[in-house]
């Protein structure tokens, strides 16, 4: 009776503390933990990487030049008789160029439109008419086109959208991983909390038993070894309480650190005994994983990247580049002279870099890329098998886990009831202390087994959400491509 009164007193004191359920801890982990902040930052970083990729296909308007460009010096000028004359030079040579560059994604080339302007000013001219001269290109259109070369833009258009989509799904998976770790931290604290409750409960009961045995010993109804056994059990109980308090402090500190809690507020966790309704089949889980999981997008991306390596090796065999330009330029002593009857400006060139004898270098490069592609295909095939096997195993575990929860919960109830009966029998002298201690240990083991079954279920529950990106209890997707 004393033990039960002590237990209820502890529960009433703990009720003053702030209570957290499992869902509360998970929401805290997803909203404010350091790992969730890191995941948010990675998501933002990947978004801006994708924006950078998209900008590679847009026209770029660029202004470059040197304004002002001033120099003053004394220059050595050779004369006809072989002597030298030192002449002071003071001049400025300013230039500006405005260009619009458009990449051609399906060929890998670029087309650009440019306009430039130069101003040369001599501050010590020998002839005043040449003191200031203007030059410039009214308009210039230029094409730069690699031939038989590797087209980075075309391959990026195939891989980068997949990489971005993969990153968005990876973010959701990271949040589910954070939830799974929050479950682990939650049960670490809950285990320590329950162990402390068990230890305090056992301490109160063993103290009562010791006093009873001491009274029986004093009147000669029990031998001294029974009294010493009760005293030893009491000392062990005190040690268990001390150790349980230390373990609880450590577990709470670790959970605070993981959740990002800054204050030292004491809290109590509530046992998550309400199991969400869950119906899942292997076929459904596999289908959802293939539709939603980042890994399956990564499989496709890795295959394309392997093909890209082969294309890149092939493009390095011959290096040929075509350059063509047409424009109008002019010069004069005034700015308006540039735009009066400008002359044509034309260039055309085809550069070649073809190996005549390379001792099998290009062939080795090609065969290496092809071999790497084959290896990559084999690795991806194995990864797909391993991933499917992981899902199949996890889904089939759920029936066992639900059965374990039912069995261990019933065992916990039976163990507690058996201990109460054993305690009552001990009080009236119909049960010895050894059998009472056995009932106590079985009660404690049953409680811990029940909590362990709950931990295994909730861990598997969030692992399944992470692997499929699907909430089976609410029957909804955790991620859609429009997000």
Image: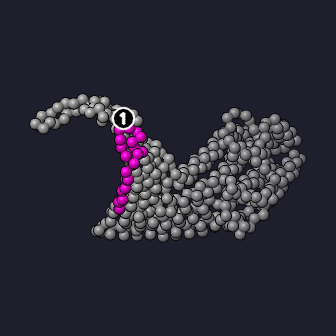
The vertical placement of 287 against 483, above or below, is below
User: Which quadrant of the figure has residue 222?
Assistant: top right
Residue 421 locus on image (x, y percent): 87, 51
Residue 122 locus on image (x, y percent): 31, 33
Q: Is 346 a magenta residue?
A: yes
The vertical placement of 209 against 326, above or below, is above
Side (left or right) of 284 relative to 89: right
Q: Residues within 10 Å of mark 1 (few under 14, many from 20)?
A: few
Side (left or right) of 80 relative to 69: left
Residue at (31% x, 30% y) in the render: 123
Residue at (39% x, 58% y) in the render: 324
User: Which quadrant of the figure has residue 458?
Assistant: bottom right
Give the camera-side residue of 90 and 370. 90
Q: Which residues are magenta?
A: 330-350
Q: Is 285 a magenta residue?
A: no
Q: Can residue 442 be seen in this snapshot?
A: no
Q: Can residue 5 be seen in this snapshot?
A: yes
Q: Secondary structure at mark 1?
A: loop
Query: Among all residues in the image, which is located at the extreme front?
Result: 341
């Amino acid at each position: 009776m004393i033990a039960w009164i002590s237990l209820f007193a502890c529960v009433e004191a703990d009720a003053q503390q702030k209570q957290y359920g499992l869902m509360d801890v998970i929401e805290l982990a997803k909203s404010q933990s350091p790992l969730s902040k890191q995941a948010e930052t990675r998501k933002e970083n990947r978004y801006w990487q994708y924006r950078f990729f998209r900008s590679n296909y847009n026209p770029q308007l660029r202004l470059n030049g040197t304004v002002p460009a001033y120099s003053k010096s004394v220059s050595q000028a050779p004369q006809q008789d072989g002597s030298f004359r030192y002449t002071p030079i003071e001049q400025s040579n300013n230039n500006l160029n405005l260009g619009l560059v458009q990449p051609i994604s399906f060929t890998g080339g670029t087309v650009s439109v440019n306009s430039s302007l130069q101003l040369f000013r001599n501050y010590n001219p020998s002839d005043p008419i040449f003191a200031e001269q203007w030059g410039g290109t009214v308009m210039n259109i230029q094409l730069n086109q690699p031939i038989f070369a590797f087209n980075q833009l075309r391959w990026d258009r195939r891989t980068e959208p997949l990489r971005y989509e993969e990153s968005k799904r990876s973010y959701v998976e990271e949040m589910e991983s954070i939830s799974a770790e929050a479950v682990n931290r939650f049960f670490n604290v809950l285990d320590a909390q329950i162990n402390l409750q068990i230890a305090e409960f056992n301490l109160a009961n063993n103290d009562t038993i010791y006093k009873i045995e001491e009274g029986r010993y004093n009147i000669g109804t029990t031998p001294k070894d029974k009294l010493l056994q009760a005293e030893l059990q009491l000392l062990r109980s005190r040690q268990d309480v001390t150790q349980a308090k230390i373990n609880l402090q450590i577990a709470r500190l670790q959970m605070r650190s993981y959740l990002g809690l800054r204050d030292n507020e004491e809290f109590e966790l509530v046992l998550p005994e309400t199991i969400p309704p869950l119906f899942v089949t292997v076929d459904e889980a596999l289908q959802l994983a293939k539709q939603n999981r980042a890994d399956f997008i990564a499989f496709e991306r890795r295959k394309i990247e392997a093909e890209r390596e082969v294309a890149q090796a092939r493009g390095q065999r011959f290096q040929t580049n075509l350059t063509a330009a047409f424009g109008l330029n002019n010069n004069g002593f005034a700015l308006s002279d540039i735009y009066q009857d400008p002359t044509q400006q034309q260039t055309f060139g085809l550069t070649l870099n073809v190996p005549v004898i390379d001792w099998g270098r290009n062939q080795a490069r090609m065969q290496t890329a092809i071999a790497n592609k084959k290896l990559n295909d084999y690795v991806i095939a194995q990864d797909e098998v391993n991933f499917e096997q992981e899902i199949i195993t996890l889904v089939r575990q759920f029936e066992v886990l639900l059965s374990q929860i039912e069995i261990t919960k019933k065992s916990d109830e039976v163990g507690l009831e058996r201990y109460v009966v054993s305690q009552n029998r001990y009080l009236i002298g119909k049960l010895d202390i050894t059998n009472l201690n056995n009932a106590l240990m079985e009660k404690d083991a049953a409680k811990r087994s029940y909590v362990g079954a709950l931990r295994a279920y909730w861990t598997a529950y969030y692992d399944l959400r992470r692997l499929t990106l699907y909430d089976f209890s609410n029957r909804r997707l955790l991620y859609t491509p429009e997000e």
